[in-house]
Amino acid sequence: MSDDDVELEARLEEQEVFEPSESFVSQANVSDAGIYEEFEENWPECWEGAADLLDWEEPYDQVLDDSNPPFYEWFTDGTINASTNCLDRHLDERGDEAAIEWVGEPVDEDNVTLTYSELHEKVNEAAAALRDLGVGEDDVVTMYMPMIPELPIAMLACARIGAPHSVVFAGFSADALATRMNAADSEYLVTCDGYYRRGDPLDHLDKANEGLGSVEHDTDTVVVDRLGPNGDDFGHDLAADQHDWGELMAANEGATVEPVDRDAEDMLFLMYTSGTTGQPKGVKHTTGGYLAWTAWTSQAVLDIKPEDTYFCSADIGWITGHSYIVYGPLALGTTTMMYEGTPDHPDRDRLWEIVEDYEATQLYTAPTAIRAFMKWGKQYPEAHDLSSLRLLGTVGEPINPRAWKWYYKHIGDEECPVVDTWWQTETGGMMVTTLPGVKDMKPGSAGPPLPGMDIRIVDTNGDEVEPGRAGYLTVNKPWPGMLRTLYKNDERFIEEYWREYSDVDSDDPDDWVYFPEDGAKIDEDGYITVLGRVDDVINVSGHRLGTMEIESAIVGVEGVAEAAVVGGDHEVKGEAVYAYVIVEEGQEESEAFREEIVQGVLDAIGPIARPEQVIFTPELPKTRSGKIMRRLLEDIANEEELGDTSTLRNPEIVEDIRKVVQGN
Ligand code: WTA
């Protein structure tokens, strides 16, 4: 342990509760503790305040229509356009202020500031260009792009013309792109030639083209030229159904597109996320409720004000970037930052350099990043003036108290509150976290449910558990930002999220309970500690991966007979992928074959799912009914004491596998 760690632990280790600083509270957007009671008494009308943060074309009739649970409708019959709310309405007062500060990889000093007027102009041109291509209302447009300004421009252009977007994380593989385009019947793709990683140009169009090869219907593709001449070596030629973004934009220079009136319940976007089965789930978010939810939580939790320069280091390819880089912050008219690169290039102080240069006021990042910063050492943040920061946030996975305290001290100088925000792709926005101007913080615990949320920790029967005991997190009342269904699959929506704790034959909303598949416990003060997923989903560096998706990729490799994937603890990533593999008769268990298996995963999903270890085993531990006992495999990966093996059909195999992994 370094001297610094010793000092930090001595002073902060004992401290379990942290009060927000007076300087923060005195200026916080929400500082009245009465809000909790007020929302409870006035539910669901309490959400009118969130809707009031937006400009509506037609006012809504009813805050919540819960007549057909779990198909709840919010702000019924209201009409609204998301791009108007993120752009047009800010033009008078903030037209010349920065909407997006884009920081590129430090290759050619080509950072971009887009003012609200400029962004508005570009979004209009892009909307006109997409329309020219034939994109109509309700056509799903897929985007497969890294963190370049054209990504939010294309998203807002879609919102303007009422075409839902489906953004696929650029790090995903060609196969993953094809699966998502096929599932959504998406006929349009916006992508780019390539991008930079640690200073080097990286081919992206090649991967997109490979994916398009497996799309079952005709498509039109728009290609952004990110690399210019640095991409010449890739030798890309656009096919007949591929169009150059720059040319389309030039052809539509100065165009204006009337925003389409969308019903509050019309789809704003789809986002595919991992679930228990191999098939990703198409989470559907709507226009009114989602926008109200992201705007309200951005204001209440992230404390965003128009004059802020707010920095979220997530990728827009995930829900965090959708809600808290694009829609929430822009709806509030603030300056939102986008960073294309990685935190360790050209050096490990890259984020701190950006915070200092842009005088960022908030930083919202993931625990995995904080654990990496901690490992690199405090000298990196110490070399920069971070005093512009007012609030820190984390999202994506549980944060351990040590990492929380390091963040609080070395980044926030013990002045910035830290909000640990629990939520999911499906919830659209934050659900459990402290209101930073109201509540004390407890490192390791996300905090109480937000006002208006009815969240309970229950046992398998649905009865609330005692404080301190582990149980399952459930949401007992609907909220505006919730997913409305899984795309074209209402049945799976009910199966995945509701059946467990609901009376699915009932019309009474009180009988319907949303189950996010997380384990959790609650303390005497109502603070919730989220323990992690209880389904077959693992969380690698804050990225959600289905073990079944990885298993099917592995089984797809010739020579593999069977595979089981589990998450094992990892110091920086939180969890890492452990793959247990049975090979086919005659297949050698060689290092080369291990690499083939790893490559199979990279091809099917992408580098985020790269197995940390591939373990060859003659058998997998199975119950008598033939179910793989993943829990035992997890115990082995984590070198924990092995759980009960007596119900196994083949208990002896467990010891054999343990020896292979642990080497003794
Ligand atoms: C986990 C990311 C503990 C959780 C916004 C959830 C967390 C899954 C936290 C959703 C947190 C997210 N503390 N666990 N503050 N935030 N999770 O859909 O298991 O990518 O179910 O959404 O991440 O991941 P998703």
Image: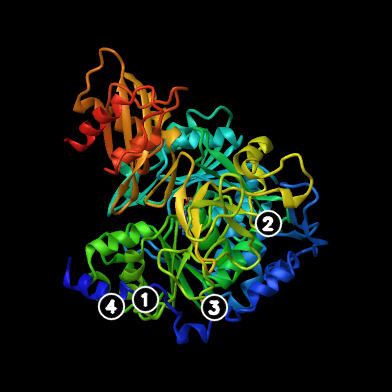
Judged from the image, the secondary structure of the residue bearing numbered disc 4 is helix
The figure's colour scheme reads rainbow
Disc on res. 438: 3
The percent coordinates of residue 63 (x first, y second) are 77, 62
Q: Relative to 446, is 225 above or below?
A: above
Residue for point 32% across, 47% down:
569
Q: Amino acid at mark 2?
A: Lys
For mark 1, give the secondary structure.
Answer: loop
**For disc 2, does the CB lie below 8 Å from ligand 1?**
no
Q: Is residue 317 left or right of residue 610?
A: right
Residue on which disc 4 sits: 11
Query: Which one is in front, 156 or 74?
Result: 74
Disc 3 crowd, CA 10 A, few/some/many (<14, 14-19, 20+): some
- State how many labels appear: 4
Which amino acid is tagged 3?
A: Val
Which badge, 2 or 3, comes first in the chain's sequence?
A: 3
Residue farthest top in this picture: 586
Q: Which residue is mark 2?
A: 477
For label 3, the SS is loop
Can the viewer see residue 632 in this picture? yes
In this rendering, the label closer to the viewer, 1 or 2: 2
- 10 Å neighbourhood of mark 1: few (<14), some, or many (≥20)? many
* Residue 412: image tag: 1
Amino acid bearing label 4 = Arg
